[in-house]
Image: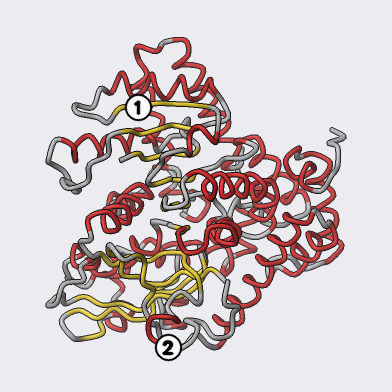
Amino acid sequence: MKLLIVGGGGFRVPQVVEVLAAARAGSGLYPGLEVDEVCLYDTSAARLDVMRAVLRDLNYPQAPIITSTTDVREAVAGSDFIFSALREGGTHGRVIDELVALREGVLGQETVGVGGYAYAFRTVPAAMELARAVRDLAPEAWVINFTNPAGIITQAMRSVLGDRVVGICDTPIGLVRRATAAVGGDAARVSQVAQGSDVDFDYVGLNHLGWLRSLTVAGEDRLPALLADDEALDHMEEARTIGADWLRTIGMLPNEYLFYYYLNRESVARIREEAETRGQFLERQQGAFYDAVAAEPGRAGELWTRTHDEREATYMAESREESERAGRRAEDIAGGGYQQVALDLMTALRTGAPARMVLDVGNADAHAGDGQGLVVPQLREDAVIEVPCVVDADGVHPQRVGALGGPELGLVASVKGCEELVIEAALSGDERLAWRALASHPLVDSVNVARRVLDGYLERNPGVARTFGHRVRH
């Protein structure tokens, strides 16, 4: 079996290979998952060289054969599964996305608001090229999309590949597992489907915009008790960053990215006060890492481990109080990350052993199975939403959730409408649609600000300029 990693020069590669090596040895979390070849595809030969050096130095016993290429069609041919982690424009593109927005007093985070939309504008064309290559050369392959903004990119690729594209994020299932542990339940049971599992939950929304609305353990909804318990809530990073009183007010546990909506003014102020943005930190850190490995390939594994640990510890630092900026609690990062979600999904599809997870899927994907209509009736059929799913050898099966209403429905509908404008703008090259998408986002308070932000991206970000037929002036 061949696994293709798109963005194969990126940081997650060693974590995936480590798990697959353990599986081939008959140990670890996936002893039945046999991958013979891992193909690394990246547009940068230099990054591929560095990642191959890291893998050689880490030297995982019984690792699959590692191949690499800068030719997308060569990479796709013969693939059974494709992990897509595109980084179109690199970390420097992210830096521009952040700074242009912050100059106008608008959030520049890479998946939320105008920063996320700039990332999508330059990424959708590359994602569609990949989708067409998969359609032509590996039509039976499953595409597991890590590429942010995941909801937008997944929805765009599904227009070519249909339901064989599934978007993933580790945040929702990690939230459910941590909440289960906080109420004294067994977090391992969250993913179990077998009869007799005593954990159930209701989660609904979009990628980086969703809520855990019930958590049933042994037949009792334990979420109200969790929300009422300050000591238990202290184990939930969302409560510490967003505020326990607000969580009790809404009666739900929000995805951690709701921090940027509920505390938008504070988040923008904190980011502007920092010495560097997240993108600037990553550009500096990763630049130093790739340069160091190129200079000392014999230390590649050590350098990767140190850099990766620092990266994880500083994730979403602006959402935490200054006293907690230096690192995250172990319980906050114990969910396994994107790679565990991807491998859980891959294992269930390949082996048929059913698993339950929260995935980015089509709003109509459950329709054929139960005849009850769309999962979220207020959204389009092709809208990609984030809901609990059961996965087995027959595919991905979205589960029914409670009705979405009130302010949460309004926010979801508004953001999804903007996402659809982003896709249409990126595919057509229509600047007016791009302006409308940015101006309509709930975190943008002026159409004039949106226009200036868009002009800034067109002037400074080559990927965005290319999508809309501009030349970068600076």
Foreground of the two, 425 or 259: 425
Left or right, residue 406 beside residue 324:
right
Q: Position of residue 71 (x, y in %)?
A: 55, 30
Q: Nearer the viewer, mark 1 or mark 2?
A: 2
Residue topped by disc 2: 371
Residue topped by disc 1: 66
Eyeballing the image, is 156 above or below 226?
A: above
Foreground of the two, 77 or 32: 77
If you read the primary sequence from the N terminus, does the residue marked by circle 1 or circle 2 appear first?
1
Eyeballing the image, is 207 above or below 400?
A: above
Alpha carbon distance from label 1 to label 2: 44 Å
Foreground of the two, 247 or 296: 296
Q: Position of residue 220 (x, y in %)?
A: 21, 86
Foreground of the two, 91 or 63: 63
Q: Residues within 10 Å of mark 1 (few under 14, many from 20)?
A: some
Eyeballing the image, is 189 above or below 312?
A: below
Which kind of residue does numbered mark 1 sit on?
Answer: Ile
Element assignment for label 1: strand
Element assignment for label 2: loop
Q: Position of residue 267 (x, y in %)?
A: 59, 58
Residue at horizontal 59 percent and vertical 80 percent from the top: 379
Which kind of residue does numbered mark 2 sit on?
Answer: Gly
Q: Which mark is residue 385?
A: none
User: In the rendered view of the protein, which quadrant contains the N terminus?
Assistant: top left
